């Protein structure tokens, strides 16, 4: 197991710098259940990971999830974040308020990305190097804003493994959720090619979801500004 920034550093050295089977564990948002459930397991097995944090709601709830019925889900507090960081878990940026970055003006994208980094660095007293796009949504312009803001990597989703030559500002990830069985996770990690299920999911869901979000983008912009 490597943190995302460790992976980027070792990748820059070429194949010789990477372990034979590197695995990156990432957790998005900064919910309190990371501290209660994931952190003890990571400590038990001496696993490294990267936690991407939405800064505005630390010590509060995930209020951006009201429409999904999870707006009262508890977030980490700063004391827990400091303990997580001290345990060797990399803390990365995940914006300040968790907007869909590709539906808001670039000026606000820059504010969301930079303010999150500034707050985390002030609280942790160290450089914050890695970023994750909320929902995985990004464009070439957004990638450049993240780079200009001082990050050295950024994670998307795409339901694919990252390779040595994957763009370090669009690292792909496989998603595991409560419905992912051990057998399913093993299949995702050991298969040479994406499963038919993943390919069918991507073909069916992604274009439709893109269209729906683009159609609602003007409304999203008015609400967000």
Image (spheres, rainbow, N blue to C red):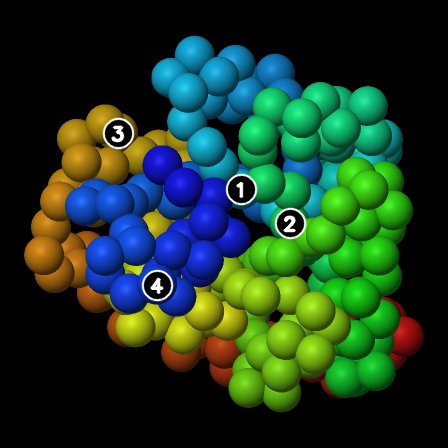
The answer to whether residue 211 is visible is yes
Residue 208 image-quadrant placement: bottom left
Earlier residue among tags 3 and 1: 1
Earlier residue among tags 1 and 4: 4
- Mark 4 vs mark 3: give the one in front: 4
- Residue under circle 4? 13
Q: Are marks 2 and 3 in contact (CB under 8 Å)?
A: no
Residue 12 image-quadrant placement: bottom left
In the rendering, at what x and y percent does residue 92 appear? 64, 49
Judged from the image, the secondary structure of the residue bearing numbered disc 2 is strand
Spatial CA distance of label 2 from label 4 is 22 Å
Q: Residue at x 83, y 30 (%)?
A: 78
Earlier residue among tags 2 and 3: 2
**Left or right of 209 in this view: 126:** right
Spatial CA distance of label 1 from label 4 is 21 Å
- Residue under circle 1? 50
Would you call the spot at circle 1 few (<14 residues within 10 Å), some (14-19), or many (20 or more)? many
């Amino acid at each position: 197991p490597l943190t995302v920034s460790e992976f980027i550093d070792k990748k820059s050295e070429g194949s010789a710098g990477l372990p034979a089977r590197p695995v990156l564990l990432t957790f998005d948002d900064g919910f309190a259940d990371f501290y209660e459930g994931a952190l003890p397991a990571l400590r038990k097995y001496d696993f490294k990971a990267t936690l991407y944090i939405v800064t505005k709601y630390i010590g509060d709830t995930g209020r951006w999830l009201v429409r999904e019925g999870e707006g009262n889900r508890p977030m980490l507090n700063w004391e827990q974040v400091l303990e997580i960081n001290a345990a060797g878990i990399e803390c990365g940026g995940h914006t300040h308020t968790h907007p869909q970055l590709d539906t808001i003006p670039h000026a606000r994208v820059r504010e969301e990305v930079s303010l999150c980094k500034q707050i985390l660095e002030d609280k942790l007293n160290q450089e914050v190097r890695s970023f994750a796009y909320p929902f995985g949504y990004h464009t070439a312009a957004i990638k450049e804003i993240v780079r200009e803001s001082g990050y050295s990597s950024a994670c998307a989703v795409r339901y694919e493994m990252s390779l040595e030559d994957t763009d370090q500002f669009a690292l792909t990830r496989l998603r595991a959720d409560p419905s992912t069985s051990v057998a399913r996770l093993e299949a995702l990690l050991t298969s040479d090619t994406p499963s038919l299920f993943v390919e069918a999911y991507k073909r069916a869901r992604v274009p439709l979801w893109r269209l729906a979000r683009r159609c609602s983008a003007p409304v999203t912009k008015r609400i967000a500004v």
